[in-house]
Image (cartoon, rainbow, N blue to C red):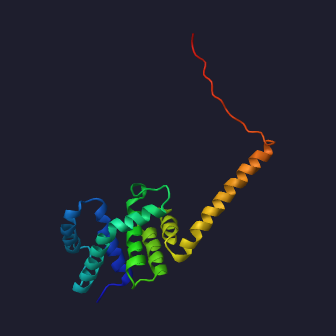
Amino acid sequence: MAMLRRTLREQIFKLLFRVEFLPGDQMKKQEEMFFDSGDQTYSEEDRKEISDKFEKILQELPEIDRMIAEKTEGWGIDRIGKVELTILRLALYEMKEDDTVPEKVAINEAVELAKKFGQDDSPAFVNAILSKFTEEGEKEAPVRDKKEALRREEKEKLAKERSGGAEVHIVSSRKTKD
């Protein structure tokens, strides 16, 4: 009997997680060890599906990482937790490359993986990043930027009004010993 999609996704996540800790040339051996570890029994069909998707994600990894880096303003790939990064990689592959997985399902499943394997704030982080890749998220980004700029302008205007229009310059001076 074939595994449920959620179980397959979880297995792909576990295999993909190893990428962060091992050089690329060792991944084929890791994949073999993964299937032969005895933790899970895989049908030939399941093995093929997991391997195929894993290999496709590995091929797209540089592009996926570039996309993640673009949307995680102020957070480089190296600052994202390994669990969260792996979940984002898997979900983004499903959202952008796998026509069999609807966008909303990919996001929901990623959030579920984050609940199971991540820290307390992982589900919210994963959801926030992935939502930026949806059509709605793409449309909202310029609006968010514009709203942020307006808020900053409003704060600056309010600060000026409070100070009577005067600008304050702080000059630092240091006493020196003679």
Q: Position of residue 11 (x, y in %)?
A: 32, 74
* Residue nearest the viewer, comparing 108 with 104: 104
Query: How far across and how far down the image is residue 13, in percent?
Result: 34, 71
Residue in the picture at 45% in, 73% down: 112
Residue at 44%, 78% (x, y): give it: 106
Task: Assign the C terminus to one quadrant of the image.
Answer: top right
Q: In front here: 73 or 6?
A: 73
Q: Is 147 positioned to the left or the right of 15 in the image?
A: right
Q: Quadrant of the N terminus?
A: bottom left
User: What residue is at 27 percent from the left and 74 percent from the top?
Assistant: 55
Most distant residue in the right direction: 164
Residue 44 seen anywhere in this rendered image of the structure: yes
| Direction from residue 136 to residue 115 in the image, left or right | left
Relative horizontal placement of residue 35, taking residue 16 as reference (left or right): left
Total count of labels: 0
| Residue occupying image coordinates x 24% and y 82% | 48
Q: Nearer the viewer, residue 107 or 174?
A: 174
Q: Quadrant of residue 40?
A: bottom left
**Residue 119 pos. (x, y %):** 46, 62
- Please identify the residue farthest to the bottom as the structure is shown: 1
Residue 118 in view here: no
Image quarter for residue 153?
bottom right
Question: Looking at the image, is 21 positioned above or below residue 178?
Answer: below
Q: Position of residue 54 (x, y in %)?
A: 29, 74
